Image (tube, coloured by chain):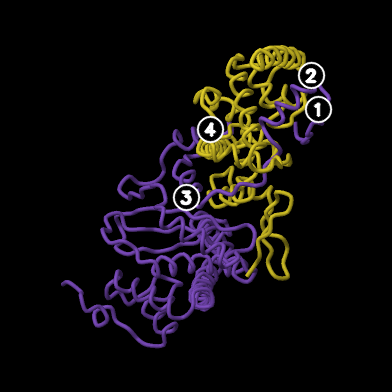
């Protein structure tokens, strides 16, 4: 029997003494022709990363799961138009970011407090110690969330992609299909507004 | 945007604000695997692929082309049932099918009483599962496994050069016989080439019959290797239950009872084995 191993997002099936049977390009081509088993292997290789990215953006586990599933459904529909030979993950992540930003606006995520269990988990990742530090960081994050809630949707989008996805302005422009200049101006305005809002909040 | 470029943090115009925003989103998270149910939920929503322009044109062509098939013979195309699709995917994985992996087509016909599997001798990827249109009974898992594994195994042997060569020879001889017949009819040419062609057709057909049976038995041996003798036997018995007391196979194919006899080692008749048979 063969073995499965994920290698930089590439799923391979190896047969004893024979050539590689299934690699990502092959899986993509098969999935583009409607092969659900091939798509399942793509899901296995990429869904955990996609879920982590969605969770980092929206901070709500159930919503992040919906976003991940929705992203894969969008990817399934878009696969016949996928440019073969291109890497799959960046393409998938572009879909994920667009879909996540739409879903977050639709669910008014910034209007709702971050669930405590998610908040605690994030602080642990950030390396905060238990007790007073943790409480302080949770409070600060709530302030930022309230600030973000007062921005307009486009400003929230650029902020989310810049700080929640670590994208450059050029990458943000490609994800949102905006000119780079527009991204820069919206990012600057959003920062200015947030700075004012957070300073007022402190007073 | 095919390259992934994470940006450096904390060098914006507002370092304090940058820091707070970075703290709000937190660092990059570790992978968050989802449970199997999550995939199942996605799978239930996977519809047909949105086709490209070329595929749409082909579909338009196939819908609007003149129908050559007689109207009386109805073959219904329906989506492949989920259990069959799952069993096929599992078998493809477990049997480690070589590239290009086979694909399954399923058709329903009112002319058959029992399920059957067909593989095109031309060497395509398709394995065709033919199911009776009004078969109220469900296929047992072992029965389904045997049908699908038989299709895969036969496809494997049909791609061997010896089989393909004989097919080619048969087609050539039939063509030769056709030409000889036309020549005889129009020009009153010698009858000898026609007789030779007919003789060759009979010989090649006989060879095709023998080779077909041999291929079917070899495929059965492979099925036994893949599924194990007991499961293969169980599946063949279940199939025999559906085909009733049919003893003769098609041309170039052994009957089910011959296959059972060879695989299980015991001659089994459908009527004696099935205690719950309703007459």
- Chain A colour is yellow
Determine the secondary structure under disc 1.
Answer: loop
Do we see residue A77 in this rendering?
Answer: no
The quarter holding residue A190 reads top right
Q: Is residue B239 above or below residue B87?
A: below
A35 or B26: nearer the eye?
B26
Tell me the tag on residue B182: none
Chain for disc number 1: B
Q: Which residue is mark 2?
A: B14
- How many C-alpha atoms fall within 10 Å of the one at disc 1: few (<14), some, or many (≥20)? some
> Which marked residue is nearer to the observer: mark 2 or mark 4?
2
Do dots 3 and 2 share one subunit?
yes
Q: What is the CA distance from the residue labelled 3 to the residue labelled 2?
A: 44 Å
> Which marked residue is nearer to the observer: mark 3 or mark 1?
1
- How many C-alpha atoms fall within 10 Å of the one at disc 3: few (<14), some, or many (≥20)? few
Q: What is the CA distance from the residue labelled 2 to the residue labelled 4?
A: 53 Å
Q: Earlier in the sequence, mark 3 or mark 2?
A: 2
Do dots 1 and 2 share one subunit?
yes
B92 or A50: nearer the eye?
A50
- Whether label 2 touches label 4, CB < 8 Å: no
Tell me the tag on residue B37: 3
Q: Which residue is mark 4?
A: B56
- Chain B colour is purple
Q: At x 65% / y 39%, what residue is drawn?
A: A123
The quarter holding residue A80 reads top right
Tell me the tag on residue B10: 1
């Amino acid at each position: 029997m063969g073995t499965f191993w994920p290698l930089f997002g590439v799923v391979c099936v190896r047969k004893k003494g024979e050539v590689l049977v299934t690699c990502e390009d092959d899986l993509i081509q098969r999935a583009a022709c409607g092969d659900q088993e091939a798509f399942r292997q793509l899901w296995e290789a990429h869904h955990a990363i996609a879920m982590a990215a969605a969770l980092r953006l929206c901070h709500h586990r159930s919503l992040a799961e919906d976003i991940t599933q929705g992203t894969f459904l969008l990817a399934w529909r878009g696969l016949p138009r996928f440019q073969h030979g291109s890497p799959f993950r960046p393409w998938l992540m572009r879909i994920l970011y667009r879909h996540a930003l739409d879903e977050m606006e639709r669910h008014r995520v910034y209007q709702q407090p971050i669930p405590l269990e998610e908040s605690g988990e994030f602080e642990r990742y950030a390396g905060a110690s238990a007790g007073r530090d943790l409480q302080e960081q949770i409070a600060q994050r709530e302030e930022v969330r309230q600030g973000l809630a007062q921005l307009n949707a486009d400003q929230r989008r650029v902020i989310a992609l810049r700080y929640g996805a670590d994208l450059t302005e050029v990458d943000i422009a490609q994800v949102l299909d905006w000119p780079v200049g527009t991204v820069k101006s919206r990012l600057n305005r959003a920062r200015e507004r947030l700075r004012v809002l957070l300073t007022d909040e402190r007073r | 945007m095919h390259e992934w470029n994470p940006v450096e943090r904390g060098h914006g115009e507002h370092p304090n604000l940058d820091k707070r925003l970075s703290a709000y989103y937190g660092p990059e998270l570790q992978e968050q695997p989802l449970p199997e149910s999550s995939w199942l939920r996605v799978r239930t929503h996977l519809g047909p692929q949105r086709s490209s322009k070329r595929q749409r044109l082909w579909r338009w062509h196939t819908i609007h082309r003149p129908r050559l098939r007689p109207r009386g013979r109805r073959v219904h195309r329906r989506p492949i049932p989920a259990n069959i699709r799952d069993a096929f995917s599992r078998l493809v994985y477990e049997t480690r099918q070589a590239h290009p992996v086979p694909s399954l087509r399923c058709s329903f016909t009112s002319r058959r009483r029992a399920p059957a599997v067909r593989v095109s001798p031309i060497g395509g990827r398709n394995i065709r599962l033919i199911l009776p249109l009004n078969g109220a009974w469900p296929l047992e898992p072992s029965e389904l496994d045997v049908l699908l594994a038989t299709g895969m195994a036969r496809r494997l042997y049909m791609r061997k050069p010896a089989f393909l060569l004989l097919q080619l020879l048969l087609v050539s001889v039939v063509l030769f016989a056709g030409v000889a017949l036309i020549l005889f009819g129009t020009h009153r040419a010698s009858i000898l080439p026609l007789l030779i062609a007919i003789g060759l057709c009979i010989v090649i057909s006989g060879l095709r019959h023998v080779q077909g049976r041999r291929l079917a038995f070899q495929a059965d041996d492979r099925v036994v290797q893949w599924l194990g003798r007991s499961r293969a036997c169980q599946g063949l018995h279940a199939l025999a239950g559906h085909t009733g007391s049919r003893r003769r196979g098609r041309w170039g194919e052994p009957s089910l009872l011959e296959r059972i006899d060879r695989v299980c080692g015991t001659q089994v008749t459908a009527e004696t084995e099935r205690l719950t048979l309703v007459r």
